[in-house]
């Protein structure tokens, strides 16, 4: 019995740990979410997983292109870029279309309930993103944004080329 309890507790701890990790990758946007429809929940959760896997794919591509020495979620740069090359001042953000409001994108819809809540939240996100990008640029960082909907191997290739050009140029 005791052994069983330990197993269950370990399992719960694992679930707790996993949910904490994914909450961190959600960029502090989970606080005080209102009740949302099942469809919205599914979208949000899919975005979360998709974003993480996009980030992993980008990191893998960077490594195979020999672009190492990057920091993840680097706190010393404004906006904690998902991937940062501090020496070269290159910041990459992998943005979820829903949370970061990709303009004109079908994933950037507004849930039908509690519209005011969502609009306020989205405005805050847009303002924060804009502030972060401006702050980075004023400190001479190059900012590269990868939207989740435009993610493809072609997009990664163009990001790698952009990075290499920026590195050679400085
Ligand atoms: Zn999009």
Image (cartoon, grey):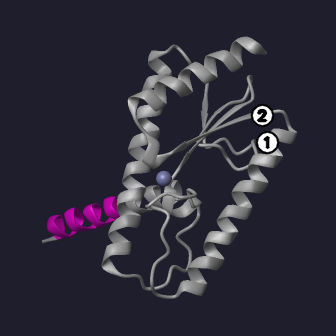
Helix, strand or loop at mark 1? helix
**Vertically, is 151 above or below 65?**
below
Label 1 belongs to which residue?
136
How packed is label 1: few (under 14 Cα within 10 Å), some, or many (20 or more)? Answer: many
Q: Which residues are magenta?
A: 2-16
Outermost residue, left side: 1
Query: Is residue 68 in view?
Result: no
* In the image: residue 125, left or right of residue 152: right
User: Which one is nearer the viewer's eye here, 16 or 131?
Assistant: 131
Residue, x 38% and y 73% (percent of image)?
A: 40
Residue 13, labelled with which disc? none
- Image position, residue 112 (x, y; %): 45, 83
Label 2 belongs to which residue?
141
- Image position, residue 46 (x, y; %): 35, 59
* In the image: residue 128, left or right of residue 1: right
* In the image: residue 30, left or right of residue 48: right
**Vertically, is 142 above or below 108?**
above
Residue, x 40% and y 35% (percent of image)?
A: 152
Label 2 or label 1, whichever comes before in sequence order: 1
Q: Is residue 123 magenta?
A: no
Q: Are marks 2 and 1 in contact (CB under 8 Å)?
A: yes
Query: Is residue 104 in view?
Result: yes
- Image position, residue 150 (x, y; %): 45, 43
Outermost residue, front side: 104
User: Which one is nearer the viewer's eye here, 132 or 154?
Assistant: 154
Residue, x 57% and y 67% (percent of image)?
A: 29
* In the image: residue 77, left or right of residue 17: right
Q: Name the magenta segment's main secondary structure.
A: helix
**Vertically, is 81 above or below 16?**
above
Q: How many marks?
A: 2
């Amino acid at each position: 019995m005791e052994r069983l309890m330990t197993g269950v507790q370990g399992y719960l701890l694992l679930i707790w740990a996993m949910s904490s990790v994914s909450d961190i990758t959600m960029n502090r946007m989970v606080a005080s979410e209102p009740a949302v429809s099942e469809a919205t929940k599914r979208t949000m959760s899919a975005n979360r997983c998709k974003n993480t896997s996009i980030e992993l794919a980008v990191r893998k591509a960077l490594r195979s292109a020999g672009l190492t020495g990057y920091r993840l979620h680097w706190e010393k740069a404004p906006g904690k870029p998902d991937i940062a090359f501090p020496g070269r001042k290159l910041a990459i953000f992998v943005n979820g279309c829903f949370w970061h409001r990709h303009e004109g994108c079908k994933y950037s819809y507004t849930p039908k309930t509690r519209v005011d809540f969502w609009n306020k939240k989205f405005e805050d996100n847009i303002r924060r993103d804009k502030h972060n990008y401006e702050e980075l640029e004023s400190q001479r960082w190059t900012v590269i944004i990868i939207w989740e909907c435009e993610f493809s191997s072609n997009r990664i290739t163009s990001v790698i080329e952009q990075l290499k050009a920026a590195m050679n140029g400085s």
